[in-house]
Image (cartoon, rainbow, N blue to C red):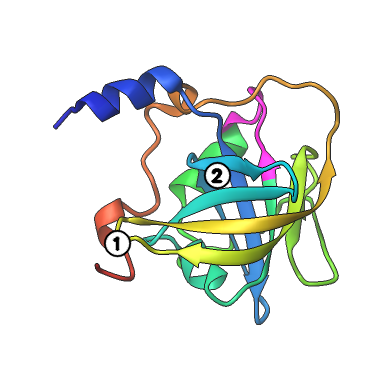
């Protein structure tokens, strides 16, 4: 069912990111459409993880994350992280990554990124959970054109929102 909110959000056409993390040796990463800078001073960034995703379950046990900004030429990486389930496959196999001291995978092909520490997770009963994070570092390869939701309109997610791990 289409709503006024759906129409507004389609018009906004949010940029996409890939969030990666790890906990207890288990790596995770997913495509994220809900995210925003949340404070200038101190520097804060928020991203919302689907409760259906493997990354959400790993994030519950993690304190550090990488937020990778996708460019308009990163369609295949977006599909890779958005259409596969981390509970069924290691999404990092065959990708060029480095791993931080804390175990967070950094994607070499996505050099525009933040490294963040979790401050809080807010579960308001919806199908996504907001992670508020303190920005530890920011890396940029220069100006870029972001990849937007509209550029992946035919993407079938690895899990639907009704497959959430936690029900309200």
Mark-to-mark CA distance, 2 and 1: 28 Å
Residue drawn where x is 82% and y is 44% of the image: 138
Q: In the rendered structure, which disc, 2 or 1, sits on the residue that comes first in sequence? A: 2
Residue drawn where x is 32% and y is 56% of the image: 127
Magenta-colored span:
68-75
Q: Quadrant of residue 109?
A: top right
- The location of residue 163, given as percent across then percent down, is 28, 61
Q: Is residue 71 inside the magenta stretch?
A: yes
**Total tally of numbered discs in the picture:** 2
The secondary structure that most of the magenta stretch takes on is loop
Give yes or no for contact between labels 2 and 1 (Cβ–Cβ under 8 Å): no
Observer-nearest of 93 and 159: 159
- In front of the other: label 2 or label 1? 1
Residue drawn where x is 65% and y is 82% of the image: 24
- Kindly tell me whether residue 76 is visible in this rendering: yes
- The location of residue 141, given as percent across then percent down, is 86, 31
């Amino acid at each position: 069912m289409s709503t006024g909110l759906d129409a507004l959000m389609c018009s906004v056409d949010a940029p996409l990111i890939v969030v990666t993390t790890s906990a207890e040796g288990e790596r995770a990463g997913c495509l994220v459409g809900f995210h925003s800078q949340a404070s200038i001073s101190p520097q804060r960034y928020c991203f919302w993880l689907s409760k259906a995703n493997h990354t959400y379950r790993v994030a519950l046990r993690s304190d550090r994350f990488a937020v990778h900004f996708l460019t308009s030429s990163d369609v295949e990486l977006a599909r890779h992280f958005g259409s596969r389930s981390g509970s069924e496959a290691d999404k990092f196999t065959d990708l060029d990554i480095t791993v931080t001291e804390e175990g967070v995978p950094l994607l070499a092909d996505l050099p525009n990124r933040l490294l963040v520490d979790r401050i809080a997770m807010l579960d308001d009963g919806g199908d996504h959970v907001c992670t508020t994070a303190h920005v530890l570092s920011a890396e940029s390869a220069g100006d870029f054109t972001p990849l937007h939701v509209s550029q992946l309109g035919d993407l079938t997610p690895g899990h639907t929102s009704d497959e959430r791990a936690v029900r309200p």
